[in-house]
Image (tube, rainbow, N blue to C red):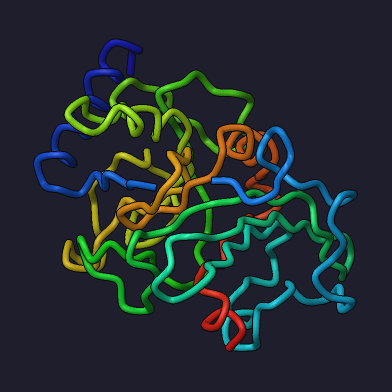
């Protein structure tokens, strides 16, 4: 398909998603991080001495991390009803998980849920694969398939602080079809279960269900997450994740 036709298809997909209310306007800080909003492994020690486990992730959720996964994005929410979180990237070397970098983040403005519903303003707890990316900005060198189109642009009737939320996006594979643009409105579990749950740029407060982090963090994840390493996200409030 030529570039003009592809652009038209993506705009059409976005229009359908917006009309159906499925393109989530994730309204989603920094807590003692570096100038780029990150902490490197060198500046923060490991959360645990047991390198075979993702820190502070209990048996219930650890068992759902595929054995093939060599990269894990852990989202530690501060509380069930809190919008504040920390994102940490772990990579696996042999049998050991190594902490790479971390960033301050936000999740759903009402917190977390294990039974996500459309427009509940909570982020879904769980383990999900990370397969597709995209955004308004040009591909920064992503290893995941990257869909570059202005169709990601946030509506300008949103507050100006939110206009750049979707400059970079990584789709969280919750109630979506893997291998498609993050704008694809298809919901395999039905629209009541919500969708369009993404990692995207932070605007300093809670989101509609997505996870948001600084631009430098999103660029780093896009350049680092590798389909060959089967990346996943494990996300939820700290108490639930420890279960």
Is residue 108 shown above or below 184? below
In the rendered image, the quadrant that contains the N terminus is top left
Q: Is residue 183 above or below residue 171?
A: above
Residue 218 x, y percent position in the rendering: 58, 38
Q: Residue at x 20, y 60 (%)?
A: 119
Q: Nearer the viewer, residue 149 or 207?
A: 207
Q: Examine the rendered structure and indicate whether residue 100 appears above or below residue 12.
A: below
Quadrant of the rendered image containing residue 239: bottom right
Please give the name of the residue rendered at 35% of the width and 52% of the height, measured from the top-left corner.
207
**Residue 237 coordinates in the image, percent (x, y):** 51, 74
From the viewer's side, name the closer residue of 195 and 189: 195
Q: Residue furthest left?
A: 19
Seen at 35% across and 31% down, the residue is: 161
Q: Is residue 168 left or right of residue 35?
A: left
Query: Measured along the vertical axis of the image, is residue 34 above or below residue 163?
Result: below
From the viewer's perspective, tell me whether residue 25 is left or right of residue 33. left
Relative depth, front residue between 35 and 128? 35
Count the marks. 0
Quarter of the picture containing the C terminus is: bottom right
* Residue 104 image point, x, y percent: 60, 51
Determine which quarter of the picture holds residue 111.
bottom left
Residue found at the very far front of the displayed protein: 32
Q: Please state the horizontal and vertical placement of residue 162, each as a whole percent of the image.
A: 34, 34
Question: With 65 as the anchor, is 115 left or right in this view?
Answer: left
């Amino acid at each position: 398909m030529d570039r003009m036709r592809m652009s038209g298809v993506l705009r059409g997909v976005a229009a359908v998603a917006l009309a159906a209310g499925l393109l989530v306007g994730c309204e989603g800080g920094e807590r003692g991080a570096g100038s780029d909003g990150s902490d490197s492994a060198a500046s923060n020690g490991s959360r645990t001495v047991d390198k075979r486990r993702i820190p502070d992730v209990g048996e219930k959720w650890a068992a759902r991390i595929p054995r093939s996964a060599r990269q894990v994005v852990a989202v530690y929410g501060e509380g069930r009803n809190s919008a504040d979180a920390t994102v940490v990237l772990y990579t696996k070397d042999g049998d050991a998980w190594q902490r790479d970098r971390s960033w301050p983040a936000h999740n759903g403005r009402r917190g977390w849920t294990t039974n996500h519903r459309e427009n509940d303003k909570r982020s879904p707890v769980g383990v999900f694969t990370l397969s597709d990316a995209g955004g308004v900005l040009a591909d920064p060198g992503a290893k995941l398939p990257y869909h570059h189109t202005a169709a990601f642009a946030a509506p300008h009737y949103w507050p100006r602080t939110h206009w750049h939320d979707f400059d970079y996006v990584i789709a969280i594979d919750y109630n979506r079809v893997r291998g498609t643009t993050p704008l694809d409105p298809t919901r395999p579990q039905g629209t009541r279960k919500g969708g369009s749950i993404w990692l995207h740029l932070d605007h300093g407060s809670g989101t509609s269900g997505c996870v948001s982090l600084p631009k430098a963090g999103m660029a780093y994840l896009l350049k680092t997450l590798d389909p060959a390493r089967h990346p996943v996200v494990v996300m939820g409030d700290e108490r639930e994740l420890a279960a």
